[in-house]
Image (cartoon, rainbow, N blue to C red):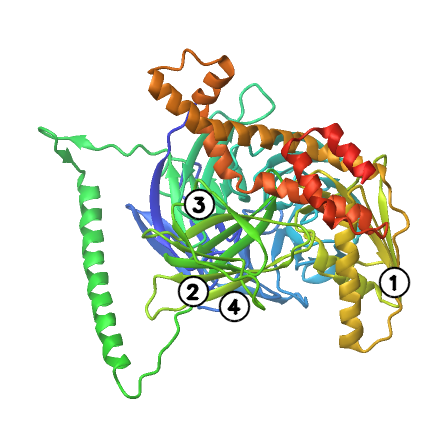
Amino acid sequence: MEIHLNRVDYMQVGVTSQKTMRLLPALGKKATQKVAIADHDGIITCFGMKKGEALPVFKTLPGQKIARLDLGGAAGTPQEKIFVGSGSQVRGFTKKGKQFLTFEANLTESINAMHVSGADLLVCASYIYNHYCDCKDQHYYLSGDKINDITCLSSENPTRPVPVLACQDRVLRVLRGSELAYDTEVPGPPSVLELYNKEGGEEILYGTTNGKIGLVRIGESAAATRWEIDNDKKKGGILCIDTYDIMGDGVGDVLVGRDDGTVEVYGFDSDSEPTLRFEHVLSESVTSIQGGCVGKESYDEVLTATYTGWVTGLTTEPQKAESGPGDEVRMSKEIQSKVEALRAELEQLQVKVLQGREQYQQTSQSSTAVSAVPVFSINDKFTLCQDDASYSLTLEVQTAIDNLLLQSDVPIDLLDVDKNSAVVSFSECNSEQPNGNFLLATYRCQANTTRLELKVRSIEGQYGNLQAYITPRLEPKTCQVRQYHIKPLSLHQRTHSIDQERPMNRLSLVGQFSFAEIHSWVVFCLPEVPEKTPAGESITFCFHNTFLGTQLEATYCKGEGHFKSDNISTISILNDVLSKEATKRKINLNISYVLFINLSDINDDSVSHTLKMIHPKLEYQLVLARKVQLIDALKELQVHEGNADFLIPEYRNILDESANLLEEYKKQPAHLERLYGMITDLFIDKFKFKGQNVKTKVSSLLEILDNYDLNSLLDFFKEA
């Protein structure tokens, strides 16, 4: 069963954060609902629709940036009181805009997640969870990783709610009071949580930053996954979820908003797993989504709020145009009056813009002129994609982007992104100079582009900084810089366990360093490690390499660190970087360090294990490269002979698939060279730990790779 929804834009407020728009309860069964939305200017706007126009109910004065908005009220009454979190403060407003609560949560960091349930207020900063009942402190919990969102289950005991935290380390943490009851792993860093049944129940919907959706049932001692939807089409990450019966079949549908602007409606058939029923793409990320009735009575809709503050509805109300004589389209009087009002408003805005420009030109030529740099917000995200071992850089600006300059002091490859329509040009770089560049690329954006998505792939062992200089279409010209650290083991991703049966190499460090210091070194080396030093006396983190599939385990405490991996090159990189960081601290802090590095536990079997893991990737890339090399010659033969019937089936297949082969080869620049480099590093690292310099034999290794055979390669590694 398909559904058709029509887009209606209602109004625009300031830049919004995730989950800052809610619909107030309806007064009647099919009556329209009021909308409450908060923005970064600290303004709460509440409006309703009347005769097709958005009429304000109330609007608060500007203040501190609002990070969350939730509805609450006494148990058993309509949840129509508006609560907002800004900084470390929570404020409450009635549905008419009267402030009745100002509560200081006494957090050292700003509130980034909040849930209100009756007299219970649950707030989270980056790592801290606090539970207040009637504004009195009840429970406290320090999370092991950053908290992205929170929701709360209705417990059988009303005095003991069951909070669930969505944490960056790919787990949902279920609390009992101030203690962790248990945690459950999900297939990506969870960014948003929502109760599946708002009236109560034990099922929670979650969305992840890598675009996956799932439903888990929270039990007393464990959680069970009911269903999971993969992100096969590589859409954006999930920012907001809601449940509402938009299909009108009596079953709640799942409404999803993504950071690439995609709005989705998932419905249920006889299957227990939902299926996609509707999809619409907005031009910017969707920060909030709600199902309800806003524009017109009896017509349900999906209401969304975007990053730049647009409140947009996707309504079930049909938008019909009446046909007149010939090809003319007649509009109803209501639509005609709307169009006339919009034209008048547009003319007024054009006049204001012209007046503003003239005034600016006059003041800028004055001897007492003071130039003011326009301020603009940027929403940026730099995340590792497991599927293709690349980093996705997403930049979203509240106004149109003019151009973007990318500068990197480490070798990285820029990958093609289908969604990106900007024109890229490269500048020559001299990487051999001190502080030289390896990459200078400029993206020139088309008109009205507010969101840009790029992909880069780094090389492990090479670390430094990637900088983005964003210039919007504003006068006077201004630019903001964003910096992203490329870490030494940049392609490693956090996991919760490793295969202990693999042949492992071990690196041990012993010295006079604190727990906080060795943790800072691990943060410097590896992505997805929390900045905050973990609680307790020791910690263990597990990782897997998204490119090769090799693994790493790091266990450390005060004065001691142990690292094990099935890839010698990973151990070599850690050895070099940790030694360098320890030496640097010795100089900076003027502390006498004695650092012992034990490298005796090197496993020769791990080398052949790693080569066998590389083998299918290398073989595939070699076959792909050979096919691409043949395409031009085969096309010439085809033109010369008039057809390709005389070719053997293998060559005919290459011609038939030539477009796909070229596209795939283009999407993976330097992929083969990257694999060659990894095998070369593995060869050098193996013998480096044995005290041998084998760089003179690299040319022989490259000859074997050019005529690749796995057994020959394994023999070369053993005999060298």
The quadrant the C terminus occupies is top right
Q: What residue type is labelled 1?
A: Lys
CA gap, disc 4 to disc 3?
23 Å
Task: Identify the mark at residue 64; answer none if there is no mark.
Answer: 4
Q: Which of 449 and 690 is in front in this view?
A: 690
Query: Mark 3 or mark 1: which comes first in sequence?
Result: 3
Residue 362 is left or right of residue 387, and the answer is left
Determine the residue located farthest toward the bottom in the rendered image.
367
Query: Mark 4 or mark 3: which comes first in sequence?
Result: 4
- Mark 4 nearby-residue class (10 Å; few <14, some 14–19, many ≥20): some
Q: Which of marks 1 and 4 is in front?
A: 1
Q: Where is residue 514 in the image (x, y as percent from the top left)?
A: 84, 66
Q: Residue at x 69, y 47 (%)?
A: 492
Q: Where is residue 676 in the image (x, y as percent from the top left)?
A: 65, 41
Q: Mark 2 points at which residue?
A: 376
Secondary structure at badge 2 equals loop
Q: Which amino acid does label 2 sit on?
A: Phe
Contact? badges 1 and 2 (CB < 8 Å): no
Q: What residue type is labelled 4?
A: Gln
The quadrant the N terminus occupies is top left
Q: Residue at x 39, y 42 (%)?
A: 313
Query: Mark 2 or mark 3: which comes first in sequence?
Result: 3
Q: Where is residue 340 in the image (x, y as percent from the top left)?
A: 17, 50
Contact? badges 4 and 3 (CB < 8 Å): no
Query: Mark 2 or mark 4: which comes first in sequence?
Result: 4
Q: Mark 3 points at which residue?
A: 304
- Mark 2 nearby-residue class (10 Å; few <14, some 14–19, many ≥20): some
Secondary structure at badge 4 equals loop
Q: Quadrant of residue 366?
A: bottom left
